[in-house]
Amino acid sequence: MKKVVVGVLVFSFFLLAGCSSIDRHGLLAAGYSTEYVDGYVDGYSAGCHMAGHPFYEFVRDVGRYEQDRQYSKGWNDGFTIARTDYAAVW
């Protein structure tokens, strides 16, 4: 029984560690535009979802993605980073 509990705890840690929360304020403080950060946050959530993380949703504002270059750049960057982060854990 003890091995099962330890296994579940280890699995849970890796599951949750794969995609971490996003420091929106840190990105803004680093000089990224609000549009880029909005896209990055949405793309990161979508990337985690596509990689199989159960607590993230696929998010993309299609209108902004098609018309706002900063949003789409941020979305693509966030999506790629999230999938890389999550894949590295597994």
Image (spheres, rainbow, N blue to C red):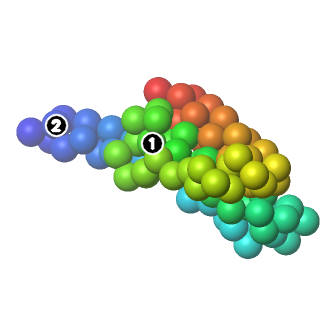
Q: Nearer the viewer, residue 40 or 24?
A: 40
Q: Residue sitting at 90 percent across and 65 percent down?
A: 31
Instruction: Give the amino acid at mark 2.
Output: Val
The label on residue 49 is 1
Asked if residue 19 is positioned above or below residue 85 in the image, the reply reads below
For the N terminus, give its image quadrant: top left
Task: Answer with the quarter of the image where residue 81 lies.
Answer: top right
Sequence-first tag of 2 and 1: 2
Q: Residue sitting at 52 percent across and 45 percent down?
A: 46
Task: Answer with the quarter of the image where residue 61 lies.
Answer: bottom right
Q: Residue sitting at 15 percent across and 41 percent down?
A: 2
Closer mark to the observer between disc 2 and disc 1: 1
Q: How far apart are marks 2 and 1 (CA)?
A: 27 Å
Side of 1 relative to 70 (left or right): left
Side of 85 relative to 49 (left or right): right
- Provide residue 67's location: percent of width, then percent of height: 75, 52
Q: Which of 81 and 50 is in front in this view?
A: 50
Q: Write down the residue under mark 2.
A: 4
Q: Which of 64 and 87 is in front in this view?
A: 64
Asked if residue 45 is positioned above or below residue 27 in the image, the reply reads above
Q: Nearer the viewer, residue 21 or 74?
A: 74
Query: What is the crowding at mark 1: few (fewer than 14 residues within 10 Å), some, or many (at least 20)?
Result: many
Instruction: Give the amino acid at mark 1.
Output: His
Q: Residue sitting at 43 percent across and 51 percent down?
A: 56
- Provide residue 79's location: percent of width, then percent of height: 63, 40
- Provide residue 70's location: percent of width, then percent of height: 82, 53
The label on residue 37 is none
Side of 62 relative to 90 (left or right): right
